[in-house]
Amino acid sequence: MHHHMEIFKKVDVIVTPTTGMTAPKIPSSALSYGETDLQTTGYLMRFIIAANLLGFPAISIPVGYDKQGLPIGLQLIGRPWGEATLLRLASAVEELYAKPKKRPASFYDVLKTK
């Protein structure tokens, strides 16, 4: 925590990718045996661990798509009790990257009323 608090003396927000890679292909065997690829898990969790373990507020904003059409996220990490700053910045970033969002072929809107 000490190192992060030193960083927050100079900046209001730490900006990172949300994950170290876009979504990997999940093999069909994962349906039977689960997915236990620790290297992939490490890439996916690389940037989110610090905020989660240290209790810093953080938010992820969709900012685009890779060449395969998979979403790319930007993570903003704030200082303790810095949620208001994060939400204002996230709103501005989201407006800047406002594009129609792609939905996966198997998308189901759980909030949609009949």
Image: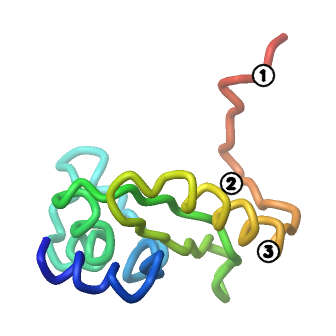
| Residue that appears at 23% across and 67% down | 49
Specify the amino acid type for callout 2: Pro
The quarter holding residue 104 reads bottom right
Rounded to the nearest angstrom, the CA distance separating label 1 from label 3 is: 25 Å
Question: Eyeballing the image, is 18 above or below 108?
Answer: below
Image quadrant where residue 4 sits: bottom left
Residue at image mark 1? 112
Q: Earlier in the sequence, mark 1 or mark 3?
A: 3
Determine which residue is flagged by label 2. Answer: 104
Residue 44 placement, left or right of 60: left
**What residue occupies the far front of the structure in this picture?**
9
Q: Nearer the viewer, residue 12 or 44?
A: 12
Amino acid, disc 3: Tyr
Give the alpha-carbon distance from disc 2 to disc 1, as whole Å. 16 Å
Tell which of 85 and 66 is nearer to you: 85
The location of residue 28, given as percent across then percent down, is 36, 57
50 sits left or right of 80 in the view? left
**Residue under pointer 3:** 97
Residue in view at x 34 percent, y 79 percent: 8
- Camera-near label (2 vs 1) is 1
Marks 2 and 3, Cα distance to the nearest angstrom? 19 Å
- Give how far across and how far down residue 32 sits, in percent: 23, 44
**Which amino acid, by three-letter code, is at mark 1?**
Lys
